[in-house]
């Protein structure tokens, strides 16, 4: 399978921003801004906006999802939310293991692995994030860290599930810092991740899985990133907060001739 046949996804991650009314206005605008595009458009909204956002996005090319969930099916976990509740509120996907969850809320690879298994069990499509910190990169441990994250985060995931999930590479040093990985640096990491997956699962799985790059993606670097052989989509934080800017990123992808 070549890059052309892998799924192309442009995903926005609003993080802790927007009320449901703001979400409604945003999605209505985004729908009117989007030109015909080949990529799938995903929006990870706050829990409280899921219900209204998914209703407004109905019958459009925009998929609505969440930014986190608990690994348990239900139970005494005050303040947590289960996969079935996200689905009930209109989510069709969930971001798991975002670096902010790992760094600020102490989520380990093992916890992300349990969440991943639950999301697959409930048919809630996972976008699973991995990525190294600046310190790990500068001390020459990037490959070791990525390899560990892949082995542990995706432990026991069978070939078919692995091939169909979405993996996001987000170098922690590029998130919200304005420091984008250059397209070459991002490509190098993506190619390495694909190689590790080919070794741990098999080459077919590695060829099928869609990889998103995330970290300071903007309209002016989106196209160059998307042109890289192993980058199939983008996970956009800050630049997804305004519908005109986000639609420019989706459009940048749409203008790539060979896609
Ligand atoms: P950023 O965030 O685009 O604001 O760097 C990306 C992310 O955290 O998903």
Image (cartoon, rainbow, N blue to C red):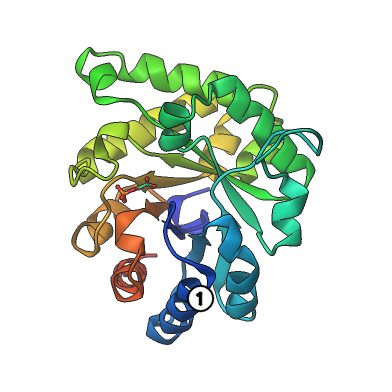
Task: Write down the quadrant of residue 57 in the picture.
Answer: bottom right
Q: Position of residue 7 (x, y in %)?
A: 52, 56
**Left or right position of 109 against 249:** right
Front-most of 125 and 200? 125
Residue at point 53%, 22% (across, down):
108
Query: Is 74 on the left-hand or right-hand side of 82?
Result: right
User: Callout 1: 10 Å neighbours few (<14), some, many (20+)?
Assistant: few
Q: State the image coordinates of residue 253 (x, y, percent, origin top left).
A: 34, 66
State whether residue 204 is above or below residue 30: above
State the residue at coordinates (59%, 79%): 56
User: Label 1: which residue?
Assistant: 21
Q: Secondary structure at mark 1?
A: helix
Q: Quadrant of the C terminus?
A: bottom left
Percent x, y of residue 233: 41, 54
Of residues 65 and 164, which is closer to you in this image?
Answer: 65
Image side of residue 79 versus residue 212, left or right: right
Q: Say which quarter of the image contains residue 187.
A: top left
Any part of residue 154 in sight: no
Residue 211 quadrant: top left
Q: Residue at x 59, y 36 (%)?
A: 205
- Residue drawn at the location 23% of the way across and 45% of the way down: 183
Residue extending furthest toward the front: 78
Answer above or below: position of 244 versus 45: below
Which x, y percent locates residue 257?
32, 70
Does the closest atom of ligand 1 sit within 8 Å of the Cβ of label 1? no
- The total of numbered circles placed on residues is 1
Q: Is residue 208 visible?
A: yes
- Residue 210 lies, with reference to residue 55, above or below; the image says above
């Amino acid at each position: 399978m070549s890059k052309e046949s892998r799924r192309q996804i442009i995903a926005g991650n609003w993080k802790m921003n927007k009320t449901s009314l703001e979400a409604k206005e945003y999605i209505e605008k985004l729908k009117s801004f989007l030109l015909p595009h080949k990529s799938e458009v995903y929006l990870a909204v706050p829990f409280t906006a899921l219900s209204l956002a998914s209703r407004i996005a109905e019958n459009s090319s925009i998929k609505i999802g969440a930014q986190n969930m608990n690994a348990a099916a239900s139970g005494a976990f005050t303040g947590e939310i289960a996969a079935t509740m996200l689905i009930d509120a209109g989510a069709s996907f969930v971001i798991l293991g975002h670096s902010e969850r790992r760094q600020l809320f102490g989520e380990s690879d093992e916890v992300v692995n349990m969440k991943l298994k639950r999301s697959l069990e409930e048919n809630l499509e996972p976008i699973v994030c991995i990525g190294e910190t600046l310190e790990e990169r500068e001390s020459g441990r990037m490959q070791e860290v990525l390899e560990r994250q892949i082995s542990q985060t995706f432990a026991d995931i069978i070939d078919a599930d692995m091939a169909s999930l979405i993996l996001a590479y987000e170098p922690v040093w590029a998130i919200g810092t304005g420091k984008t990985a250059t397209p070459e640096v991002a490509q190098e990491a993506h190619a390495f991740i694909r190689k590790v997956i080919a070794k741990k699962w098999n080459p077919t799985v590695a060829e099928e899985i869609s990889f998103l790059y995330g970290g300071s993606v903007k309209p002016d670097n989106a196209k160059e990133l998307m042109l890289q052989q192993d980058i199939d989509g983008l996970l956009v934080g800050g630049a997804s907060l305004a519908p005109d800017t986000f639609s420019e990123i989706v459009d940048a992808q749409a203008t790539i001739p060979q896609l």
